[in-house]
């Protein structure tokens, strides 16, 4: 809880600061003021969570300063400190929306009770704001709504006071899918704890799986440097946490976007990160890679994509595909820089369990991969029914929950696999992406509902899982070539004609 103290008496400020720092509730004293004008400047600079303000101060009284401060920082909680107990002061404080009215000298017990209560209220409000932000972002990335339907607060960016950042996490490992899913779940839970730790009223944060199955972290900071610093601190903290989860069996790599000032551009940037994701094979896994590094290594994207396919074919025990990729690798650039070669060997060690040396020639390297794959794939247990069962369960889950706000992450959790694995397997087995399957099912259900003239188009959209009627209509038109209202009129006219014919020809 970020606290600002405004009082013209040094001893009062020192006493209050000392008591606050002794409490178990996490409190950070971000600034002090000796008069009302300094208090206003402090509120502008810091956007504090809580301000303790003395009523009687030079230049501006505490009540006058609070009245001005409310227009600057809408989420700040105001607490009056005073030696005056007159009813008129308390009455004016209530009108201003002051949270509490403490008489000097404040006792530690009374102050602690106030702070504890404020912490509870603040945590509830921050969780609610972050959840609202997460719902908006998920709906946007999953195509359930459009930018035009978002809260204006997510789009408003006067004087570049709003900054977005995003990251995608890639898990590489040769462990069994259930083990990978468990470790990914622990990583997400730890990251969610960090979100709570860095949450302020100047930030919004969300972590969720993209339609492709990869976990993404999205955050935005508003109000200039205050929000920007909080978001940067969060992403820096998550970068360091990668080390906690990386070992000889598993690596989590973080692809980091640049600072962006518009949410639409953020979506484009996240798409670019997904496209460049294979480059982690040559740039190094288990660390944060920024957009600048990815752009520099773009020339090695073809090699990187082949390495990713090699690892995926190995994991899926598709030996013929594995051999074909090895054959294609012969045509790639042979003289890789030793640094990149080390990273490639590390990736293959993590993803398929191989032990390669950077001192080997390219031909020796390929030969070892061939021999290694042949030996290991021949002794791996056959799991022919495993993928089939997963997709069968996945489609059943979608069929039952299509009307809800579902994503591939929820289904992956149900099936004890990673979202990325489920996404790739789903497309391989069904021929279409998870999102396309879900959209097709929703559109077919929408056609059924539109046959009922009593249900409005807006209700139909909501019943098949869309918040935005505009976006639902767009998808419906793309699928069937006409607007939902046009389809309904067509069906009703056909029904009317049939009934009319029946009356004329009994």
Image (tube, helix red, strand yellow):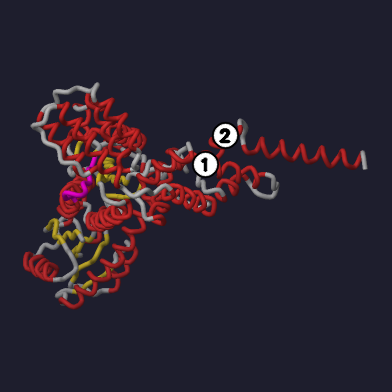
Q: Nearer the viewer, residue 224 or 364?
A: 364
- Which residue is rendered at x = 24% and y = 65% of the image? 79
Q: Nearer the viewer, residue 323 or 194?
A: 323
Question: Which quarter of the rendered picture does the C terminus lie within?
Answer: top right
Vertical relation: 187 (above or below) 500: below
Please give the residue where the numbered disc 1 appears in the rendered image: 439
Q: Secondary structure at mark 1?
A: helix
- Which residue is rendered at x = 18% and y = 60% of the image? 3
* Disc number for residue 275: none
Q: Residues within 10 Å of mark 1 (few under 14, many from 20)?
A: many
| Image coordinates for residue 70, horizontal then vertical, percent | 29, 54
> Is residue 200 in sight in this rendering?
no
- Whether 337 is among the magenta residues is no
| Image coordinates for residue 145, horizontal then vertical, percent | 46, 42
CB within 8 Å, label 2 to label 1: yes
In this rendering, would 500 be left or right of 430? right
In this rendering, would 348 be left or right of 420? left
**Which tag, 2 or 1, sits closer to the chain's start?**
1
Q: How many marks?
A: 2
> Is residue 463 in sight in this rendering?
yes
The image quadrant that residue 493 belongs to is top right
Q: CA distance from mark 2 to mark 1?
A: 9 Å
Residues shaded magenta: 246-255
| Image coordinates for residue 443, horizontal then vertical, percent | 58, 41
* Disc number for residue 479: 2
Question: Which quarter of the rendered picture does the N terminus lie within?
Answer: bottom left
């Amino acid at each position: 809880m970020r606290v600002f103290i405004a009082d013209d008496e040094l001893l009062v400020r020192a006493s209050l600061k000392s008591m606050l720092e002794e409490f178990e509730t996490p409190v950070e004293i971000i600034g002090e003021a000796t008069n009302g004008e300094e208090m206003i400047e402090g509120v502008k600079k810091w956007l504090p969570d809580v301000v303790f303000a003395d009523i009687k101060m030079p230049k501006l009284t505490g009540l006058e300063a609070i009245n001005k401060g409310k227009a600057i920082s809408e989420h700040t909680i105001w607490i009056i400190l005073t030696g005056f107990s007159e009813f008129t002061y308390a009455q004016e404080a209530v009108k201003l929306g002051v949270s509490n009215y403490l008489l000097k000298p404040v006792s530690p017990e009374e102050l602690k009770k106030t702070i504890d209560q404020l912490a509870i209220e603040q945590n509830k409000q921050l969780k609610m704001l972050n959840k609202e932000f997460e719902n908006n972002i998920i709906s946007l990335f999953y195509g359930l709504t459009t930018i035009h339907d978002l809260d204006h607060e997510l789009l408003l960016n006067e004087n570049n006071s709003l900054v977005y950042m995003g990251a995608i996490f890639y898990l590489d490992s040769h462990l069994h899918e259930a083990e990978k899913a468990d470790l990914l779940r622990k990583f997400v839970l730890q990251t969610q704890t960090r979100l709570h730790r860095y949450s302020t009223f100047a930030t919004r944060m969300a972590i969720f799986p993209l339609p492709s199955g990869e976990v993404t972290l999205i955050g935005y900071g508003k109000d200039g440097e205050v929000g920007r610093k909080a978001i940067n601190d969060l992403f820096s903290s998550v970068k360091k946490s990668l080390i906690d989860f990386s070992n000889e069996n598993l690596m989590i790599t973080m692809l980091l976007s640049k600072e962006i000032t518009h949410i639409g551009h953020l979506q484009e940037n996240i798409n670019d990160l997904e496209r460049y994701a294979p480059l982690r094979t040559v740039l190094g896994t288990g660390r944060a890679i920024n957009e600048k590094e990815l752009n520099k290594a773009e020339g090695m994207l073809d090699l990187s994509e082949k390495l990713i396919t090699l690892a995926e074919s190995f994991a899926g025990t598709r030996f013929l595909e594995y051999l074909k990729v090895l054959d294609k690798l012969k045509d790639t650039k042979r003289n890789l820089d030793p640094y990149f070669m080390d990273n490639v060997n590390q990736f293959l060690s993590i993803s398929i369990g191989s032990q390669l040396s950077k001192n080997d020639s390219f031909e020796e390297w390929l030969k070892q991969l061939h021999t290694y794959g042949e030996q290991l794939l021949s002794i791996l247990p056959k799991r022919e029914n495993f993928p089939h069962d997963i997709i069968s369960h996945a489609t059943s889950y979608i069929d039952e929950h299509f009307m809800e706000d579902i994503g591939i992450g929820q289904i992956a959790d149900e099936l004890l696999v990673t979202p990325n694995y489920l996404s790739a397997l789903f497309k391989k087995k069904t021929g279409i992406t998870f999102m396309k399957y879900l959209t097709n099912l929703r559109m077919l259900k929408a056609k059924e509902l539109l046959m009922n003239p009593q249900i409005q188009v807006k209700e139909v959209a909501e019943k098949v899982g869309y918040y935005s009627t505009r976006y639902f209509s767009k998808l419906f038109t793309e699928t069937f070539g006409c607007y939902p209202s046009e389809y309904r009129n067509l069906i009703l006219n056909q029904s009317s004609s049939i009934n009319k014919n029946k009356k004329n020809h009994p």
